[in-house]
Amino acid sequence: MTEQQDYCLRGVSEDGSVKLWLAQTTNLCEEGRRRHDAWSVAAAALGRLLTAGVFFGLNLKGEGDSVTLRVNGDGPLGSLAVVAEPDGAVRGFVANPQVDIARRSDSKLDVGGAVGRGTLTVIKDMGFGEPYTGTVDLVSGEIGDDVTQYYLESEQTPAAVGLGVRIAPGGAVDAAGGFLLQVLPHADEKVIKQLEFNISNLLPISQMVANGLTLTEMADEVMLGVPWRELARAPLAYRCSCSQERLRGALLSLGYKQLKELWQEKEQAGEQTELVCRFCGEKYYFTPSELKEMVEELDKERFKRFAASLQNQIVSAVEQTQEDKN
Ligand SMILES: [Zn+2]
């Protein structure tokens, strides 16, 4: 049985050399599956990336920061993306959610085969300046290995990542979770050996969640033989931050020419413009007159820019003339 509320536990070894994050993500993975009507292998891939996203999100510092994990693979699922925030909110999508491929020979869902070969990109947006971006080649497309590789290659942090999403026979996610271990440079070799042993002998995390283990009990399994303590616990949720205003911004970003064409087309047809949020499936509508207003807004900006550039030209022409006189 899985609990109604998803949580992530953050812990540290007593000697401070190992950091641990452990999450139950059943509800948010099921919410992602439901919103996208994702079939088993797509739901598993999306759920694993959502769970990994949680760890990246909780590691951000400030309010308003966000992190995007994008998997660009050449498999039938197409690309996947997840956005996570420091308050435990996470959302995502998979380009082709209704994909079915043969199971692996061990009867597990073939997430790696469905994702294919490609890259994992992590984009951290701190709300100011250029976002920090790191890209690694996919190791297996199983997501967990790929995120581990990202930490090692792009952040020079040895890490171990376990992600698991169990799909019930009816297609719903009935157990999901994950852990992230980060080992600091001063860690004892014996501690590292013990953790490696623990991880290779660990039950799949989705199995532990399905068995009803609490976060503390699961953390005890991962950290077996390594004294540790809990630092914090954060609630998690599938939550989107889309709004009419944000989607309006997306329309404005089309630019004057394209938006004008869209408005003319919709005006003629007498239809509203429907926009669907890729992350949550929420629908937003804009009337032709709202589009017209936006076109006029862009037109005004265009004029302002033109006037400003004209002024710059005049100023530089005047400066040029003065230089000529000197
Ligand atoms: Zn949304």
Image: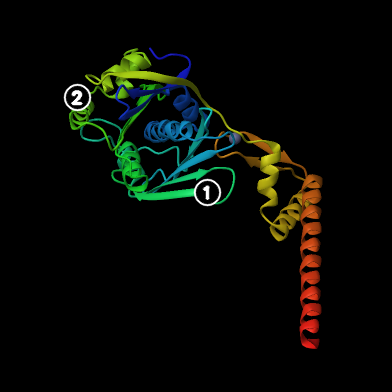
Q: Is residue 220 left or right of residue 323?
A: left
- Vertical side of 111 occupied by 215: above or below: above
Residue 256 x/y as whole percent = 73, 58
The residue that appears at 56% across and 33% down in the rendered structure is 280
Q: Which residue is mark 1?
A: 131
Category of crowding for the residue at label 1, using alpha-carbon neighbours closer than 10 angstroms: few (below 14), some (14–19), many (at least 20): some
Residue at (35% x, 42% y) in the render: 151
Q: Does 106 appear above or below 207?
A: below
Identify the residue at horizontal 76%, vertical 69% (top origin).
Answer: 309
Horizontal placement of 66 versus 55: left or right?
right
In the rendered view of the protein, which quadrant contains the N terminus?
A: top left
Pinpoint residue 283: horizontal percent, then vertical percent: 65, 35
Which element type, helix, strand or loop, lies under badge 2?
A: loop
The x, y position of residue 161, in whole percent, is 32, 33
Query: Type of residue at label 1?
Result: Pro
Foreground disc of the pair 1, 2: 1
Q: Secondary structure at mark 1?
A: loop
Residue type of the residue flagged with mark 2: Asn
Return the residue at label 2.
201
**Can you give x and y, in whole percent of width and height, for residue 281 in the image?**
58, 34
In the figure, is residue 117 to the left or right of 306?
A: left
Q: CA distance from mark 1 to mark 2?
A: 38 Å
